Amino acid sequence: MAENVERTTKTHTADRGSRTGNFFKAVSAVVWKDLQAEFRSRELFSAMLVFSLLIILIFNFALELDIKTRQSVTAGVLWATFAFAGTLGLNRSMAIEKDRGCLDGLLLAPVDRSAIYFGKVISNLAFMLIVEIIVLPVYSILYNVNLFQAGLLLVILLGSIGYVGVGTLLSAMSVQTRTRDILLPILLFPVVIPVLLAAVKASSGYLTGAEFSEILLPLNLLIAYDIIFIAVAFMVFDNVVEE
Amino acid sequence: MQDKPITLKVLDIVSLILLGISTYLALVFAPTELVMGDVQRVFYFHIGTAWTALMGFILAAVFSVVYLIKKDLKWDRYQVAAIEVSLVFFFITIVLGSIWARPAWNTWWTWDPRLTTAAVTELIYIAYFMLRQGIDDPDRRARFGAVYALVGGLSAPITFFAIRLFRTIHPVVIGGANAEAEGGFAMTADMRVAFFFALFAFTVIFVDLYWNRIRLGNLQEKVEQLKLKVTL
C-alpha cells in the first residue's frame, strides 16, 4: 500500500515535471518563432527604433533641451519615448499574427494558452529592450548624460516588463476589433500610468543621484505592478483569444 | 413590449423627491461655511456623486469576475449599466470639484492624486466604451469588456497610491486629517444632516438610474434577437 502511494506520487511529480517542461518548450517555441521572423524581416525593430529617435528629436525642439532643463526632464523624455515606440511594436507584433492567420494556428496547437501569452510577452520584451539599449547610448551622446547606470537599467527592465505584460494582453484584444489601428494606445495608456509614474520617478532618482531610500518606494511599486498585472493577464488571457 | 415595473416607477418618483429635498438641504438648510462661504455647498453633491460612482466602478469590477466565470450575458449587461451610470456621476463629481476648487485653491485643476486618479478613471472607462464599440459579436464584446474593466478597475487604485508618493492638497473631511490640505473644515450637526441625506439621496438615485439602464440593456438584447429572427 505504502509502496503504491509512493509510486503514484512519483508518477505524479514526473507527470507534472514533464508538463512544466512542455510549457517552457511551448513558450520558447513562440519566442523563437517571433525572433526568427523578426530577424528575417526586421520590419518591427527598425520601425520602433527610427520612431524612437524621431520622438527624441521632436522633444529636443518641443522642450528646448538645454543643459538646465535636461537634468529634470531626461527621465520623462525617455519614458515617453519608450511608451510611444512600445505601442508601435505591440500593435504590429499582434497584427502580424492576426493577418496571416498565425493566431489561429497557434491556438490550434495543443499547448496551454498562457504559454502563447508568455511567449509573446518575452518576444515583445526582447524587441523593446533592444530598442532601449540602442536609444540609451544615442541619447547619452546627443545630450551628454551618462545613462549607463546599473540602477537605471534595472528600472528600465522592470518598467518594460510591466508595460509589455499589460500591453500584450490589450493588444491581443485591440487587434480583434474594427478600430484596431488606433485603439491600443487608448486602452493601454490610462492603465499603465502607474508604471510610467513609478518608472519616471525612479529613473530621475537615479539620474539626479537621490538617496536609495527615496528610490525604493517607486521601485517596489514597479515590482508590485509587474506581479499583479502579469498574474491577472495570465488568468484572463484565455478569454481574450477564445473563439 | 414589457411594461415598466411598478416598483421602478415608484422609485423614479422617490428619486426625484429625494433630489429635491437634498437640494433644499444643501442650498438652504445647511449653514454657510465660515471661511469658504456658499461655494462649500457643492461639497454635499460632490461627495454624494463620488461615493455612488466609486461603488458603481467596484460593482463593475466584481461583475467582470462573475461574467468571466459564468459566461452569462446578464452579468455583462449589469456591468455596462454600472459603468455607464458611474461614468456620468463621476463626471459630475469632477465638475463640481472644479467649481469648488476655483475659489478654494485658486485654480480649476491641479495634479493632485485624487484629481489625477479621477481623470485617469474617466479615461479608462471611456476607453472601455470605445473598445466595446469596435466589436460586433456580443460574446466577444462581453469578454473583452470584462477583461478590460477588470484590468482598469485594478489599475485605478494603484494609480491613486502611486501619485500619493507625491504630496496631496485635497482635504480629507471624514476620517484622518492632512496638515497640508487646503480647504478642509469641520462639519456642524446641520451640515451632517445635509451630508448624510445627500449620500442617501444619491445612492437611491443611482439605484434608480442603474435599474432603468439594466432594463434598457435587456430591451436592447431583445431587439437584437428579434432583428436576427427577421433576417433569418
Image: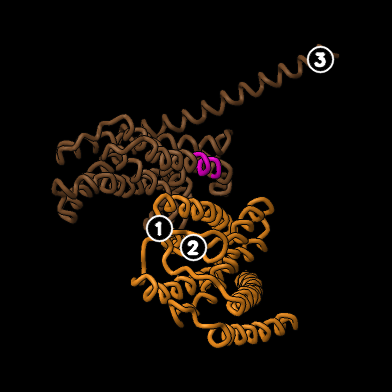
* Image height of A113 relative to B88, above or below: above
Q: Secondary structure at mark 2?
A: helix
Tag 1, which secondary structure?
Answer: helix
Residue B83 in the figure: left or right of residue A54: right
On the image, numbered disc 3 is attached to which residue?
A4
- Vertical order, B175 against A216 (above or below): below
User: What amino acid is found at the position of numbered circle 1 in the picture?
Assistant: Ile
Region rendered in magenta: A227-232
Question: Residue at (24%, 48%) from the top-left corner?
Answer: A73
Q: Nearer the viewer, residue B86 or B1?
A: B86
Question: Toward the viewer: A97 or B201?
Answer: B201
Mark closer to the chain start, 3 or 1: 3
- Amino acid beneath label 3: Asn
Mark 3 vs mark 1: tell me if same chain.
yes
Q: Nearer the viewer, residue A154 or B166?
A: B166
Which residue does the numbered mark 2 point to in the structure image?
B125
* Label at residue A186: 1
Same-chain status of marks 1 and 2 = no
Q: Colour of chain B?
A: orange
Toward the viewer: B188 or B55?
Answer: B188
Residue B93 appears at what percent x and percent y? 49, 72
Supply the letter of whichever chain is brown: A
**Crowdedness near tag 3: few (<14), some (14–19) or many (≥20) residues, C-alpha within 10 Å:** few
* Coordinates of residue A220 in the picture (x, y in percent): 45, 39
